[in-house]
Amino acid sequence: MGIKHSVGTLLMCSALACHAVQPVDLGGFANSASLAIKAATLTDAEVVDLANKSCAELDSQNKIAAPGSKYAKRLAAALKPLNMRKFNGKQLDAKVYLVTEVNAFAMDNGCIRVFAGLMDIMNDDEIRAVVGHEIGHVLLGHSKKSMQTAYSLQAARSAAGAAGTTAATLSQSDLGDLGQKFIQAQFSQTQETAADDQSYGILYKEKLSRQGLVTLFQKLATLNGSERSMFSSHPSSPDRAQHIQSRIDKDG
């Protein structure tokens, strides 16, 4: 995942969204210590549940490219060669947010969102590389850890902890903030490199061009200031481009 930056006025919860979703009941907490324990032990099913609801919040608060629009048709065409109707055991659900930021993310429930700003500067090979990278974070368990951390921070801030058997819930607003924290999650250099390699593997398996992973980072290296939102705190883009080019040279 590579999102480190708020995504503008259309993402009013800083980067997320709000939909008429029922609160998520994740049990009561007596104090911040038990809250941290709960966050660290969220099951796969609970992480998917949080992803379902926070992604729905995001979608309801942001303009999504209509199915017949040029952005939606282009994304569908770009991703079709990946032959990935599902990942992480969940149905792939890819949509475009009509915002100018250069960004994208994927969640454990199959939710993939690519921002129009990214599509405007990337070719289809590069879009596939970005999506493969984001899926890589999910498949490698990085996104689950990010959701656990985001949940811990959000639940603590909203005083979700309650004594005894009182249920702790996250409201619609909380879910929006939770999504924001997820999108802004920081990954280590090791995790980012692993996600790059996962994307490389996905492309290699389908006999698709891997050069998009190289040119993607070359383009990102030229962006300045707030436009460098997607990989602003990631490892050096030139280093990552060279890493992938070395793999291409070796594998042919």
Image (spheres, rainbow, N blue to C red):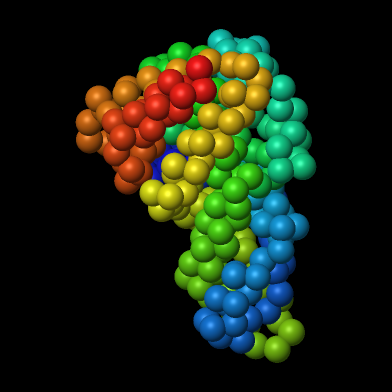
Displayed quadrant of residue 144: bottom right
Residue 139 location (% of width, % of height): 63, 45
Does residue 182 appear left or right of residue 37 in this picture? left
The residue furthest left is 224
- Is residue 238 among the parts visible in the rendering? yes
| Displayed quadrant of residue 12 | top left
Residue at 29%, 31% in the rendered image: 238
Residue shown at 48%/36% (left/top)?
A: 196
Which residue does the image show at 66% across and 20% down from the upper left?
206
Check the image and name the residue furthest to the bottom: 164
Foreground residue, 179 or 23? Answer: 179
Relative image position of residue 5 (x, y in whole percent): 37, 44
Instruction: Check the image and report above or below for 220 versus 46.
Output: above
Task: State the residue at coordinates (71%, 58%).
Answer: 44
Q: Is residue 186 above or below residue 7?
A: below
Q: Is residue 105 visible?
A: no
Res. 193 image quadrant: top left
Taking 129 as reference, is 22 left or right? right
User: Tag count in the figure?
Assistant: 0
Q: Position of residue 61 (x, y in %)?
A: 55, 39
Q: Is residue 156 above or below residue 96?
A: below
Question: Residue 108 appears at what percent x and percent y?
Answer: 65, 47
Q: Is residue 109 left or right of residue 242?
A: right
Q: Which residue appears farthest toward the front when viewing the image? A: 250
